[in-house]
Image (spheres, rainbow, N blue to C red):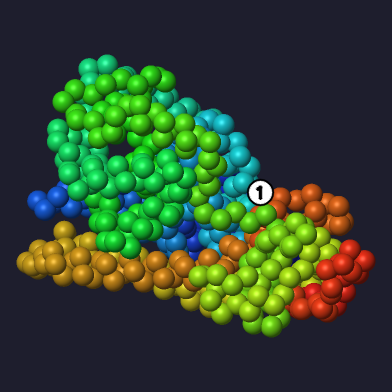
């Protein structure tokens, strides 16, 4: 199937092949992004008991794909995207996969290459969205082991049907694997056996058959303090201050402490199908009555990892006096407000500015809507994020050069010419590490191009004050951070408490400088 694609730059129609017109011609200058994925990290324990987390299969995936593209003169590799996540579990976070689609849309890469389709996805319901994205962006998908290429112009090949079949097979295999693992877990639970993960659990020895006295004392202390009303964070910070670390040698966090205290391992049991089943030969750390009381206490508390902003410009707007970010707070009369608040994270905050949230947002929102409704200003700002620049082209060229260096390094270490000694292993890893580190730096440099994608999407819509305020809070905060260079909140006049309800907010207290 051959298409004729009109290109505005040249005014001519260029032939492209495959399921849809592609944005770039196939050939030696075609820019590829290699998508890599594995389900989890590998772990191993040293002789000293230290648990090492490592990952090497994505490197093997990358080398296989790169070798093929290079040897067949299919183009150059300008980026690679590595995710440690499930391709089958719904909602599994795959940020680098999303980065690949963003880079495809922005023109930084022309196609996505994978070792096989299950590296891309293992769910049939994701095939059509992926194809729609590729078609809309004029991108190419290539799978090495499956011999699938959306640029294939063979009239007898049904690439889309074959893609569905491959993903269906991968989904079926993933489901069977998942079911087998569940059956094994249920069998171990009924038999009272321990499934060790290679990491020593806090409070027990590596084989789970004995306890660690000093860690038992810390667990009992944490249980007692939380039953008295203290929080995870308070106890974790106190452990860190006193020099008590996790079995992996890391600092305690509210999440890691919660994981320990919530685990029925403390009473020598495990969860299985909603029941608590006892372990064999595993000593309990706390008695069951105390543990159940602890769970009831914790069930009544909200648990949230990290700070979630609930106001538009919290930690974006600045105090005009001391330049510290203002944060969401409540005023003395209970109204939500933006406040320059002094705390351990902001020791230099002056505490001299406070303004009602609604008043500040009423000043900012109309100006942002006006900015988004002006195509010239949005276009001028987007120009800063364009990838078609000499600097970005230089980044692509350097990444491709490093990829060639990596291939040459592989040859020198594992397949040298006849009569040439192999590159020593220590030297190989020294050079390989330097290449990987520089490629990571190049990838971080490109992140700024992805940040503009929400603004590109916003530019395609017609905005009103009502539609802006109906948008999700996190999305609005992202747009505000992109379109504004500085937001200041100034101090208001001194007001006596009995006159507070009769005063009017001065909109001049809020100063906005847009980025374009």
- 460 up-or-down from 507: above or below: above
Q: Nearer the viewer, residue 370 or 424?
A: 370
> Is residue 129 at least partly visible in the picture?
yes
For the point 50% across and 34% down, the residue is 299
- 455 up-or-down from 35: above or below: below
Q: Position of residue 423 (x, y in %)?
A: 13, 67
Q: Which corner quadrant of the image does residue 511 belong to?
A: bottom right
Q: Of all residues shown, which one is farthest toward the front?
A: 498
Q: Name the residue under label 1.
A: 136
Horizontal side of residue 479 vs 424, given as left or right: right
Q: Which corner quadrant of the image does residue 192 belong to?
A: top left
Q: Which corner quadrant of the image does residue 201 belong to?
A: top left
Q: In which quarter of the image is the N terminus?
A: top right
The mark total stands at: 1
Tell me the SS state at disc 1.
Answer: helix
Q: Quadrant of the C terminus?
A: bottom right
Crowd class of label 1 (few under 14; some 14 to 19; many from 20; radius 10 Å): some
Q: Position of residue 436 (x, y in %)?
A: 33, 66
> Is residue 481 at least partly visible in the picture?
no
Q: Of all residues shown, which one is farthest toward the bottom?
A: 321
For the point 53% across and 76% down, the residue is 347
Q: Position of residue 355 (x, y in %)?
A: 77, 68
Horizontal side of residue 123 vs 19, given as left or right: left
Q: Where is residue 344 in the image (x, y as percent from the top left)?
A: 50, 70
């Amino acid at each position: 199937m051959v298409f004729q694609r009109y290109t505005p730059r040249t005014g001519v129609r260029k032939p492209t092949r495959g399921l849809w017109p592609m944005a770039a011609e196939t050939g030696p200058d075609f820019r590829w992004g290699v998508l890599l994925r594995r389900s989890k990290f590998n772990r191993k324990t040293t002789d000293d008991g230290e648990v090492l987390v490592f990952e090497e299969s994505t490197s093997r995936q990358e080398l296989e794909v790169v070798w093929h593209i290079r040897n067949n003169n299919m183009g150059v590799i300008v980026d690679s995207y590595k995710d440690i996540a499930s391709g089958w579990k719904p909602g599994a976070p795959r940020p680098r996969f999303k980065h690949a689609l963003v880079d495809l849309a922005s023109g930084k890469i022309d196609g996505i290459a994978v070792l096989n389709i299950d590296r891309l996805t293992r769910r049939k319901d994701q095939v059509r969205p992926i194809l729609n994205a590729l078609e809309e962006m004029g991108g190419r998908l290539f799978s090495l082991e499956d011999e699938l290429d959306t640029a294939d112009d063979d009239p007898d090949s049904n690439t889309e049907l074959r893609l569905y079949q491959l993903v269906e097979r991968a989904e079926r295999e993933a489901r069977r694997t998942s079911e087998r693992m569940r059956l094994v877990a249920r069998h171990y639970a009924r038999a009272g056996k321990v499934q060790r993960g290679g990491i020593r659990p806090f409070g027990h020895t590596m084989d789970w058959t004995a306890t660690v006295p000093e860690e038992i004392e810390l667990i009992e202390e944490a249980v007692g303090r939380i039953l008295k009303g203290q929080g995870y964070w308070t106890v974790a910070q106190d452990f860190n201050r006193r020099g008590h670390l996790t079995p992996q040698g890391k600092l305690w966090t509210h999440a890691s402490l919660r994981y320990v205290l919530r685990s029925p391992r403390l009473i020598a049991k495990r969860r299985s199908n909603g029941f608590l089943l006892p372990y064999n030969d595993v000593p309990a750390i706390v008695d069951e009555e105390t543990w159940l009381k602890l769970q009831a206490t914790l069930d009544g508390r909200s648990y949230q990892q990290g700070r979630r902003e609930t106001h538009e410009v919290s930690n974006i707007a600045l105090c005009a006096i001391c330049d510290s970010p203002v944060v969401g707070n409540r005023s003395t009369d209970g109204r939500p407000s933006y406040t320059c608040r002094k705390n351990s994270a902001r020791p230099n905050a002056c505490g001299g500015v406070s303004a009602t949230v609604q008043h500040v947002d009423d000043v900012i929102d109309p100006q942002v809507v006006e900015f988004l409704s002006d195509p010239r200003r949005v276009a001028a700002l987007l120009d800063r994020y364009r990838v078609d620049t000499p600097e970005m082209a230089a980044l692509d060229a350097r990444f491709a050069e490093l990829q060639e260096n990596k291939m040459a390094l592989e040859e020198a270490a594992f397949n040298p010419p006849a009569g040439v000694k192999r590159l020593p292993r220590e030297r190989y890893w020294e050079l390989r590490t330097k290449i990987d580190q520089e490629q990571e730096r190049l990838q971080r440099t490109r992140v700024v191009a992805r940040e503009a994608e929400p603004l590109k999407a916003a530019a395609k819509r017609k905005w009103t004050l009502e539609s802006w305020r109906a948008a999700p809070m996190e999305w609005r905060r992202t747009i505000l951070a992109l379109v504004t260079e500085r937001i200041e909140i100034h101090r208001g006049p001194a007001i006596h408490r009995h006159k507070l309800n009769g005063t009017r907010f001065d909109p001049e207290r809020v100063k906005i400088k847009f980025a374009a």
